[in-house]
Image (spheres, rainbow, N blue to C red):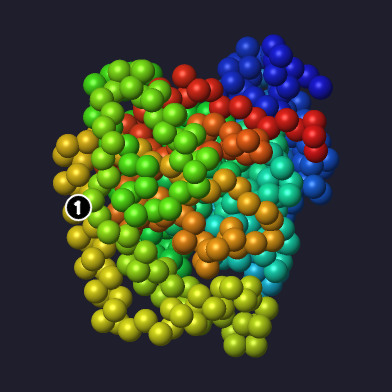
Amino acid sequence: MRKIGTVPIYELGATELLEAYRKHEVSPVEVTRAVLERIERLNPVLNAFNLVSERALEDAKASEARWLAGQPKGLLDGVPVSIKDILLTKGWPTLRGSKTVDPKGPWPDDAPASARLREHGAVLLGKTTTPEFGWKGVTDSPLTGITRNPWNPKKTPGGSSGGAAAALAAGMGALAVGTDGGGSIRIPCSFTGLFGLKPSFGRVPAWPLSPFGTVAHVGPMTRSVADAALMLNVLALPDARDWHALAYERRDWRTGLDEGVTDLRIAFSPDLGYAKVDAEVADIVRKAVSVFSDLGARVEEKSPGFANPDAIFRTHWFSGAAMLVNAIAPDKRKLIDPGLREVAEDGAKISAAELHDAQMKRGALGTHMNLFHRDYDLLVTPTLAVAAFDVGLECPPGKQRWIDWTPFSFPFNLTQQPAASIPCGLTREGLPVGLHLVGPRYGDALVLRAARAFESARPIALPDLAKL
């Protein structure tokens, strides 16, 4: 296996690959071939991909020719990337983990993220697994079965972008696109030891709009903060199909990454004032927060002061699930994951008045956090209340639904703030724990900068893949 220094080429991130391409130290063909070999060997164990491109090597050869000619295409030429099987990708079925979707298509469209990656020369490896329609925080579905965690295949990688996370952590691609409607980027990044950013809502254009509406975000999943900033440069490019998209901000998200956190005002909340957190996870996170103090930030233990918004989120999310299932032909509904059917049945009971009331309460929560960030630049919490648990379960023992063990993620889908998970330690079982960084609305650059400072002190490590 070719290496750059001591690192196998399949472990290189996008930033490192692009530098190696510029120096002609390695070619996109070599890298893509190495990644495809890993997919062939590890995907039967991890079940991260449900579709692998037949054109990846051909696309890599075209990239190699551009690099040899000194004319790379865009910002990601030759970088192998996976796309979650929630997002449309031209020519490939987007099955969303569901037996109710007809794979015959036709499939004539790219989602904005797929289109931008293609335009910037990325080598699209294939589609990664998701629970049905991304409905829960672990990754298994009636269509694709169980996806497993590279740190321990008996454990879940989380979800709903669990296939994307398993692929990245196992060296099956340098970058991955995820979606996050309540934690679906941050949950699997926490469970698999990766960096994942849920950008401010509308920062990354999305089309068609998720059935779960304006709580759903699209964002980068990576093995370094610099790669996430680079990827955001591409994903955040404008697309007129997204009516909700923010006005395009012409900037390089890598600018200012290394400015550090000196004198930033950071509020650390170990439980948001109401969450029950596993003692080992809580201890790892509390020790990790001291890194920010060591780097010069002013850290204060302070909860943001809102009540558990569980009911607000459930009203938004369960009503979206009801609409989604209602759009499926009645004769196919028996094929749907039973848990999703239950959630949809609960959602169908929500009245218009209840939904309107939840929308008003959501607005009040957003205002509350706007005011909170007048005093604090960042809010830091655990990403999750638990470490990865056994595969085949929706929840750890004692919990009812995925929302019950993700108390730190979904509130900030309601408020549409940027939020990221970065690994901050391992449990006694050797499972990753995530640190959650929440910025003010539209403060994506600040979240990336703080994450980069943390990463400089606590570099991100991959699992020991020799065990697989």
Q: Considering depth in this image, is 186 or 399 the residue closer to the camera?
A: 399
Q: Is residue 91 visible?
A: no
Residue most extreme to the bottom: 331
Q: How many numbered marks does the figure carry? A: 1
Direction from residue 188 to residue 242 in the image, left or right: left
Occupied quadrant, residue 90: bottom right
Relative to 169, does residue 141 appear above or below in the rendering?
below
As shown in the figure, which amino acid type bears the numbered disc 1? His
CA neighbours of label 1 inside 10 A, class few (<14), some (14 to 19), many (20+): some
- Where the C terminus falls, by quadrant? top right
Q: Considering depth in this image, is 115 or 351 the residue closer to the camera?
A: 351
Q: Considering depth in this image, is 114 or 3 the residue closer to the camera?
A: 3
Relative to 454, does residue 346 appear above or below in the rendering?
below
Q: Residue at x 19, y 44 (%)?
A: 372
Q: Residue at x 81, y 49 (%)?
A: 44
Circle 1 is placed at which residue position? Answer: 368
x and y percentages locating residue 104 in the rendered image: 70, 69
Q: Considering depth in this image, is 216 or 379 the residue closer to the camera?
A: 379
x and y percentages locating residue 461 in the rendered image: 61, 27
Direction from residue 282 to residue 373 in the image, left or right: left
Occupied quadrant, residue 309: bottom left
Q: Residue at x 59, y 84 (%)?
A: 329
